Amino acid sequence: MSAISVIGLGVMGAALARTLIEHDCQVTVWNRTVEKAAPLVKAGATLAHSVSDAIAASPATIVCVKSHQQTRELLATEPDVLNGKTILEMSTGNASEVEALVAFLQSQGADFLIGMIAAYPTEIGDDEATILTAGPETIWTRYAPTIRILAGKSGYVGARPGALAALFAAQYTVRQGFMFGLIYGALACQKAGVPLDVFADEEMLLNDVRGYLDVFAATVPSDQYSDPPASMATYEAAFDDTLQTFNALGVRSEFPQLMHDLVHCGVEAGHGDKQLTALIKVLGETCPGIPRVTKMGV
Ligand SMILES: NC(=O)c1ccc[n+]([C@@H]2O[C@H](COP(=O)([O-])OP(=O)(O)OC[C@H]3O[C@@H](n4cnc5c(N)ncnc54)[C@H](OP(=O)(O)O)[C@@H]3O)[C@@H](O)[C@H]2O)c1
């Protein structure tokens, strides 16, 4: 029976602790609001009376609080106990918070693995659930069996602690790019009297998205953008028409305008005969008229 501690017993932390208890792990729990520990203690967990007691009780401690910042603040109150222990951080947070947390843990001689839970609390323990992790590969290898008890499809993304925040930001951008397309597209359709169920036809849109994934897979990983079935110049012409239509309808057009301007920039940079995805090669450059984010602002 492996020993593991869980700090943070909100809805997610409680689900993690309960699943480990159900898999016969020897679980020690701590929560700022102690009452939340009662059902878990009843289920077989041991209650720790402080953060340091929880960390001392097991070789590894899962922390699942509000964000990486709260994790660091919480652990900083009890630094002496961290040396030689492993922190499995399951709170979410941004890239700079995670860097600060990892720097703190390393300064205290603790090992770490950062986890990004891609599941609801009710899905914890499910074979199909996923927790993506980053950190030293040796720690992933050691704790993968435990993490896969929590989420059967869990995996390892890479050594850099910021990898998960980058992956989250990247996938969030894809999802919200799609959502913003739906929102702006609905504006145009509403104004033109096109039924929204015709506009948002699931089969047609998902077919398009699958096609984009195919184009992406065939071009960006290999850095090969030649012989496109539709060139960037063709896309530019379609974006010209799109923008003209939005403007003629008198609806907001910031989103299509941005795409139009970036494609125009790609064509101007000499990629007109290439695949649209060749745009990735010019996004690091300055595009005339398009503000570029430098560090923490525009
Ligand atoms: N719920 C989900 O679907 C889901 C999915 C993926 C990832 N997550 C991540 O899991 C983490 C926890 O989420 P949750 O849904 O369990 O939230 P929650 O139910 O609101 O629980 C938050 C937990 O954080 C603790 N906490 C907050 N600030 C603290 C502080 N300053 N010091 C000590 N403890 C503090 C709370 O303690 P008290 O009980 O004392 O308030 C509680 O245990 C978050 O990072 C969240 O992004 C959640």
Image (cartoon, rainbow, N blue to C red):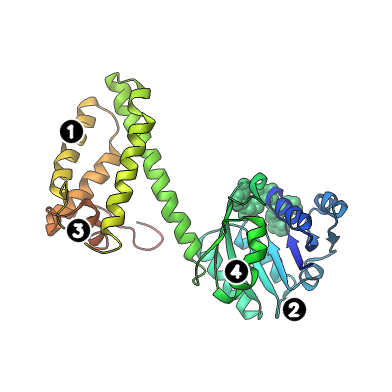
**Three-letter amino acid code at disc 3?**
Tyr
Q: Name the residue under label 2.
A: 80
Q: How crowded is mark 2: few (under 14 residues within 10 Å), some or many (20 or more)?
A: few
Give the secondary structure at mark 1.
helix
User: In which quadrant will I find the N terminus?
Assistant: bottom right
52 vs 210, nearest the viewer: 210
**Three-letter amino acid code at disc 2?**
Asp
Q: How far apart are labels 2 and 4 at the CA level?
A: 19 Å
Residue at horizontal 30%, vertical 21%?
Answer: 194
Q: Which mark is residue 244?
A: 1
In the image, residue 247 above or below residue 219: above
Q: Do the CB atoms of the residues marked 2 and 3 lie less than 8 Å apart?
A: no
Q: How far apart are labels 1 and 2 at the CA level?
A: 64 Å
Nearer the N terminus, badge 1 or badge 4? 4
Residue 134 place in picture, x, y as percent: 53, 67
Q: Name the residue under label 4.
A: 113
Nearer the N terminus, badge 1 or badge 2? 2
**Three-letter amino acid code at disc 1?**
Gln
Give the secondary structure at mark 2.
helix
Q: How far apart are labels 2 and 3 at the CA level?
A: 54 Å
Q: How far apart are labels 3 and 4 at the CA level?
A: 37 Å
Q: Can residue 109 be seen here? A: yes
139 vs 107, nearest the viewer: 139
Q: Residues within 10 Å of mark 4 (few under 14, many from 20)?
A: many
Q: How crowded is mark 1: few (under 14 residues within 10 Å), some or many (20 or more)?
A: some
Q: Mark 3 points at which residue?
A: 225
Residue at horizontal 45%, vertical 58%?
Answer: 167
From the image, state whether disc 3 or disc 4 is nearer to you. Answer: 3
